[in-house]
Image: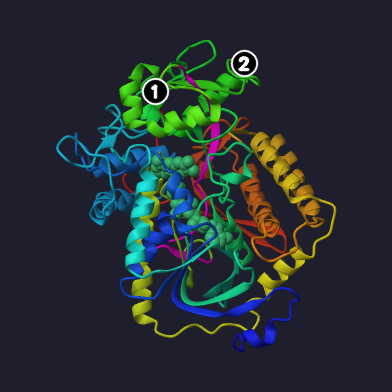
Amino acid sequence: MTNFDPETIHDVEGVPIHSVHRHDVVIVGAGLAGMRAAYEASSEFDVAVLSKVFPTRSHSGAAQGGVAASLANEEEDHWEWHMFDTVKGSDYLGDQDIIETLVKEAPVVVREFEHMGCPFSRTPEGRIAQRKFGGHTKDFGKGGPVLRACYAVDRTGHAMLHTLYEVCVKNEVRFYPEFFALSLIVRDGVCRGLVAWDIINGGVHVFHAKTVMFGTGGYGRVFKITSNALANTGDGLSLVLRAGLPLEDMEFVQFHPTGLYQQGILVSEAARGEGGYLLNKDGERFMEKYAPSKMELAPRDLVSRSIQTEINEGRGCGEDGCGVYIDLRHLGEDKIMKQLPQIHELAWKFLGIDCIKEPIPIQPTAHYSMGGIPVDIDCQVLADGKEKPVRGFYAAGECACVSVHGGNRLGTNSLLEASLFGRRAGKSIVRFLRETRAFPELPSDAAEEALGEVERILSADGSEKVGIIREELQEKMMLECGIFRDAGKLEKLTGGLRELGKRFEKIGIDDRSVKFNYDLLEAIELGHMLDFTELIVAGALRREESRGAHSRTDHPDRDDDKWLRHTLAWKRDGRIEFDYKPVTITRFQPKERKY
Ligand SMILES: Cc1cc2nc3c(=O)[nH]c(=O)nc-3n(C[C@H](O)[C@H](O)[C@H](O)COP(=O)(O)OP(=O)(O)OC[C@H]3O[C@@H](n4cnc5c(N)ncnc54)[C@H](O)[C@@H]3O)c2cc1C
């Protein structure tokens, strides 16, 4: 392998290639996972963070409701209860050894945020305030909802993200804002860096690194109705696939029960945690039928299915009958404006509804990806999805699948996961770098794949439009791979995706400049979305059971004999290949999941 030489390879017309940047650690993603890792590693090493949006605009900042930790600030709580709820919530697909780490370390991670200066809401005694959230219970599910979600009004993610940005700046983390990662350089099982596009000025940059970490977030944007930010197109997942690595449990996609009707923008579960009711168009509190003991605070998969059933059976509201209501009126103006001010503002701005006086029309919205890049408990990416590490490559947060959420994530466990495993990734990186002084060799063709992609798109002059293909993809995913799935719909979608892939090869773009070229970026993002959605659909078709958020109307029961296992999927020469691995079960044997 010869060394990368920026002077000799930039022969691509119109695309400047800039010199190589060298950092001990290069992190893609400035959400909670990426920045928590950066903060940890920057105490000892030189850390760079790339983000395609300005760091504090990462989707973590949109999180409203809270972050779970059994602090027991206002009432009794224990990590064992939190563990039980998470395992049951996951429909027994979460790995229990890792869930145990999650719930045990949660209080430490949240208190650390407090010490960094995160402005949590407070109890009258001055402790971190906690609220109720779906699926979090007392006494191994035998008691009612427990106060476990630590919050900062209804802007918890915003408070945590800004706190982290400040401590990263203090630690002199080098930020590359508005840099778009284009490809990952993995050779012979060693990660050597990555290639990125400078969105503001244009140009390809090579980042040579001893370690790379992905905290690239989720992919809600492949669905038409989603709570996710525009940036959540799952780029990291497809970069991993293109580097020949697998993805895990991609068929598990969470729909949050309450997105603003026809907008998808989130109405936090805090609204139900604080006491909001769900009503159908006839004013009936329908959760009585589906989860009589937990009602609106049953886990998300169950509440979303209940809402969708009401809609499918003709009891939905709105012009297309695809909504139901969340009613907050009985909470009163004081509580709404104090605990849920953002919900009030969003309903007013986007639907013209004053939730103090009227119920808010909502519908389920694509929210969270349980699957992702397979990693071990130390966030080390696994080349075979099981135990073989990719040297120098780590991932954490929503893009990773360390499998604490299994088939369905409980609300507030994700801010926790992103911060906690971001922290663990940072610690692993520090351990690795203490022993590894030298940079891995950078191959001479390091930038070739990325340059080729940029050049191809900048010169694309076909008749197909990126925006139209993307809309069709989002529409199809919503209709054929949404809350309820079956073989017929999924098979149709498989063909549909192939068709869209072919049309993508014939796209044309209008803007051929290099500065702030969103034509170029949207085309690259669409390529990513088409890449990994195939795995969601293929995984969903193969998994002939219903578990957690994956609900097959043609296979309505959970099948532990056959499917109590994780899916691993690769893309090789355009074909999807599967493998499976067992679920780790320690304390809680699988049982029927009832609420
Ligand atoms: C509206 C909403 C509300 C939520 N509320 C809660 C809640 O109350 N509690 C809870 O626990 N969870 C909540 N979640 C889920 C939780 O917020 C996320 O799962 C979590 O914040 C993800 O953090 P992350 O660091 O993994 O990714 P993100 O915060 O999404 O950050 C991803 C980063 O990757 C960067 N990136 C991606 N691709 C590229 C690329 N190609 N090049 C360069 N950079 C790239 C982005 O710029 C960004 O900086 C909510 C989610 C949403 C959408």
Q: Position of residue 321 (x, y in %)?
A: 62, 19
Of marks 1 and 2, the one in the foreground: 1
In the image, 156 versus 290, the foreground residue is: 156
Q: Secondary structure at mark 1?
A: loop
Q: Secondary structure at mark 2?
A: loop
Residue 18 placement: quadrant: bottom right
Residue 314, numbered circle = 2
Residue at the outermost top position: 282
Identify the magenta region: 358-383
How far apart are the two marked residues, 1 and 2, measured between alpha carbons?
23 Å
Q: Is mark 2 within 8 Å of ligand 1?
A: no
Indicate whether 386 appears above or below 304: below
Residue 276, numbered circle = 1
Indicate whether 404 appears above or below 260: below
Of the 4 image quadrants, the one containing the N terminus is: bottom right
Asked if one can make out residue 595 in the rendered structure from this viewpoint, the answer is no
